Image (tube, rainbow, N blue to C red):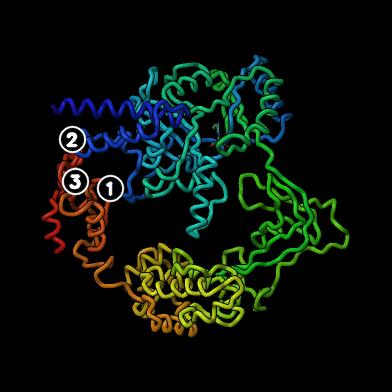
Amino acid sequence: MNTDIKEEILRLRAELDHHNKRYYVDNSPEISDAEYDGMMRRLENLEQEHPEYDDPYSPTRRVGSDITKGFTQASHIYPMLSLSNTYSIEEVDAWVRRTDEGLAGHETEIVGEMKFDGTGISLIYEKGRLVRAVTRGDGEKGDVVTDNVMTIRSIPLQLTGSGWPDFFEIRGEIVLPWKEFERLNAERAFNEEPLFANPRNAAAGTLKLQNSAEVARRGLDAYLYYLLGEDLPYDNHYDNMMAAREWGFKVSDAMTRLNSIAEIDSYINYWDTARRELPVATDGLVFKVNNLRQQLNLGFRAKSPRWAIAYKFQAERALTRLRYVSFDVGRMGNITPVANLEPVLLSGTIVKRASLHNEDIIKALDIHEGDMLYVEKGGEIIPKITGVDTSAREMAARPIEFVSHCPACGAPLVRVEGEAAWVCPDKYNCPPQIIGRIEHFVGRRMMDIDGIGEETAKMLYERGLVRSIADLYDLRVEDLENFEGFGRKSAERVMDGIRQSRQIPFDRVLFALSIPYVGETTAKKIARSVRSVDKLMSLGREALESIEDVGPRIAESILDFFASESNRSIIERLKIAGVQMELPEEEGGQKSDRLAGKTIVISGVFSLHSRDQYKDMIERNGGKNSGSISKKTDFVLAGDNMGPAKLEKARSLGIPVINEEDFLKMIE
Ligand code: IVH
């Protein structure tokens, strides 16, 4: 009977692997999404019922896990080098001639390929299975990110076909396709989280997430372009990559053999524009000598091979006149210089403003009044100023001076030590800072008060109705209903939101207060640890720094915040208004420290509580969850059907294994 089940599990795994490749690598699915999902569910159920057939390489494992653990590091077998760059066809042609000469005049076949703009990855396969994935790191060693990489559907966990060496490495680029990048940023905008500047940053950031379930959701993809090992199937790069494609890897269709300078030139000319149609970001082309023996002869420079070269695409760039520089004041008082430009068309959108970031950048570019400026977009969403056409400068033009006083409130600016930013120190009287804090306070992830946006916050402030976040709780419908664009209905909606915000838990209130450096996660940790604002206000520097995630800078910022008379009065008024200034006893908080200092691994299937509930209990009793058994593990909390390998490991290390009843007694 059970052999039937085992067979079905194995069959489903093989079929799902196959369809996975058809979908994610070949872009030509054979079955409908619904059929695929049906098979996946069937396999999930079987695996749940039969953990004895557990396999970490099962396609069901592509969803990741939410276990948090730091990354370990591993050395690269061969260092991960970079490529030297060229920016013109002539430079590429010159490189081809140099390599021909270097090879005693033998005509060399060149392989042309895309330069993907993501983050480099090294994958190690043993006996056809992915065993390790390591980031580029410093080129010598990188972070082991295998769990995260295993969620990328286009990376085969088990190779297909034949002819792969028992042990080899393959390198490529992990990318976030434009479509996923835009989706992710839209989601982040909605949640008022900082946006990723480009798909490269988003891919690199995603790969380093601690939560592989989140990685799985983000939709990373991978293109492979370099096979390394002792016994590769062919003596040339191109055939090896085509073999890799047969084994299940995604190798770009753009990869092609080029046999003359003329062919190389037309390849460049073609992709210079055609690359805009690709689903992923590219920043150039790469040319490689095809023959591996010739590669060996050409060898390496200090940081890059002589047998390869990158050709970088021109970023899309426009030249336009600077009208004036304005200075924005942020919620935390940071002053950001902004170039206000004569409108100019740049890759499909009209650009009127571009951030100049800080004073150092203005100085480095030596921008003068009325200058003609180069604006670039190159994969970034916010355009940036990259240069000045000084030949177009008026003789009398003066250099742009950074303001010395806050453009909003007139306070003399101060420069943050070790940072390039100038800050307006008058936090509690500077209007844009106050308005910014009101806007932040009402935001969705903070107090979630609907109906107050940037404009309304400004109006409320300017009419003197809301001069601090505490004033929100004194608002009446009559105050609002005569506002422009407001009626009774929208006024009531805001009042409703304000009323309901009294239920928002203390950790979110703490985040809503805009204490510098206290972000969402830090606020959560502080709230869980101190439980109430009164307690937080009573803590000294040392006590603050003993809170998880709170270092000297955050501690200083908290002390500073509560030292302000006006902040203390705001807190008092919020309390009176009924805003949650402490965490309720029963929920979320630390219950005991019975498990303090203990590292615990959860394994198997439980019947009394869910796995997540057990994880939570461990944390609330001061313990730490860990994903894998090691010498540091204090005990394993085991449900039914704990994997035999784990059991054996625990046994061999002499680590106690306890069941759920005993665990519950332990923390009772
Ligand atoms: S080959 C020794 N091929 O570009 C040669 N690299 O600037 C190693 N990259 O670190 C790299 N597309 O992360 C190669 N088709 C391609 C590439 C590529 C993108 C990245 C890679 C590398 C960086 C070098």
Give the structural element (helix, strand or loop) at label 3.
loop
Tell me the residue that label 2 is attached to.
52
Judged left or right of residue 467, residue 544 is: left
Q: Is residue 325 visible?
A: yes
Residue at the image point whose x is 37% and y is 80% from the top: 578
Tell me the residue that label 1 is attached to.
627
Give the structural element (helix, strand or loop) at label 2.
helix
Residue at the image point whose x is 57% and y is 47% from the top: 198
Residue occupying the far top of the picture: 106
Give the structural element (helix, strand or loop) at label 1.
loop
Q: Is mark 3 within 8 Å of ligand 1?
A: no
Residue at the image point whose x is 15% and y is 50% from the top: 607
Residue at the image point whose x is 48% and y is 35% from the top: 222
Q: Is mark 1 within 8 Å of ligand 1?
A: no
Which quadrant is home to the N terminus? Answer: top left
Alpha carbon of mark 1 to alpha carbon of mark 3: how far?
15 Å
Alpha carbon of mark 2 to alpha carbon of mark 1: how far?
19 Å
Amino acid type at mark 3 = Val
Judged left or right of residue 166, residue 456 is: right
Q: Earlier in the sequence, mark 1 or mark 3?
A: 3
The percent coordinates of residue 373 (x first, y second) are 76, 53
Residue 573, compared with residue 403, is above or below; it is below
The percent coordinates of residue 135 (x first, y second) are 45, 40
Amino acid type at mark 1 = Gly
Judged left or right of residue 668, residue 23 is: right
Do callouts 1 and 3 mark residues in contact (Cβ within 8 Å)? no
Residue 225, compared with residue 599, is above or below; it is above
The percent coordinates of residue 668 (x first, y second) are 14, 64
Q: Is residue 563 visible?
A: no
Instruction: Identify the disc placed on residue 605.
Output: 3
Which quarter of the frame holds ligand 1?
top right
